Amino acid sequence: MININLLPKSLQRVREPGYWRVLAVVVPLAVGSVLFSISYLTNQTIANLERDVQLRQDQLALLQPFLQEQRDLQARQQALRALIAVAEEVRLGQVVWTSEIPALLEYVPAMSDDGVTLIDFRSLNLRSVYPPSSDANRYEGAAIVSEASISGTVRGPEVLATFVRNLENAPDFGVLFQNASRQSEDEELFTYNLTVGGFSGAER
């Protein structure tokens, strides 16, 4: 049987190929699959990163006691270094007083012929000076490593003047005269105050 379509071409029914229908179904499915794959991979990556971060945080939490111990040890090390530095400074600046005092006493005027002590030390305060320091107004600008404040009594101003002069001429000492005053009960007895600087070990 032969079918003849007598309708104008504009009204005739056109039959499209079937592969367009297949494409209309396959393309959206393919795009959806790609988008789903990208979303899945992204979610997996984020999940892996979150697990990695959590793992690092757990490891850090486990290491915290050791890190705190290390910080404590470093703090103790710094404190020990500071103590060692202070000890070294003290060692370098120490004054051997057992040799300083006898050397100072060598310049004390001798006793009188009748055995009376001409000068005494009622008070003797010693201090070390480190690093050695100098003052243009003290000890003629010489650097000192020790300083002694001396007070006591002396038989007459001539004895005190002799002691001060001896210290002024000494190679290891310098002197600053403070004051002297007569004792009311004994006209020959004076009280005095001196400051003596030691040059031992310092450049003069």
Image (cartoon, helix red, strand yellow):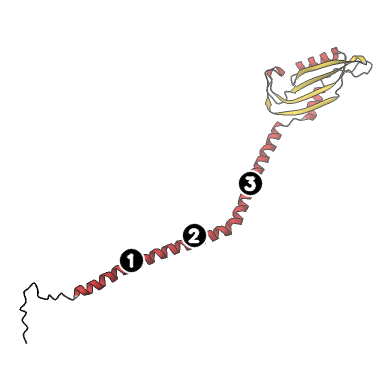
Classify the position of the C terminus by image quarter: top right
Quarter occupied by residue 119? top right
Q: Residues within 10 Å of mark 1 (few under 14, many from 20)?
A: few
Q: Position of residue 96 (x, y in %)?
A: 76, 30
Report the mark closest to the observer, 1 or 2.
1
Q: Which residue is mark 1?
A: 35
Residue that sits furthest to the top in the current view? 158
Q: Earlier in the sequence, mark 1 or mark 2?
A: 1
Is residue 142 shown left or right of residue 126?
left
Q: Amino acid at mark 3?
A: Ala
* First-in-chain label (3 vs 2): 2
Instruction: Say if mark 3 contacts mark 2, CB within 8 Å.
Output: no
Residue in view at x 25 percent, y 73 percent = 25
Q: Which residue is mark 3?
A: 75
Type of amino acid under label 1: Leu
Secondary element at tag 2: helix
**Residue at (63, 46) in percent of width and height:** 75
Q: Residues within 10 Å of mark 2 (few under 14, many from 20)?
A: few
Q: Which quadrant of the view contains residue 132?
A: top right
Question: Contact, CB < 8 Å: mark 1 with mark 3?
Answer: no
Residue that extends furthest to the bottom in the rendered view of this protein? 1
The residue that label 2 is drawn on is 53
What's the distance in space between the residues labelled 1 and 2, CA to CA? Answer: 27 Å
**Drawn side of residue 168 relative to residue 60, left or right:** right
Residue 14: % across, % down: 12, 75
Distance Cα–Cα, label 1 vs label 3: 56 Å
* Amino acid type of the residue tagged 2 in the rendering: Val
For residue 151, above or below residue 71: above
Q: Earlier in the sequence, mark 1 or mark 3?
A: 1
Task: Decide if residue 123 is on the left or right side of residue 61.
Answer: right
Disc 3 versus disc 2: distance between alpha carbons? Answer: 30 Å
Asked if one can make out residue 18 in the rendered structure from this viewpoint, the answer is yes
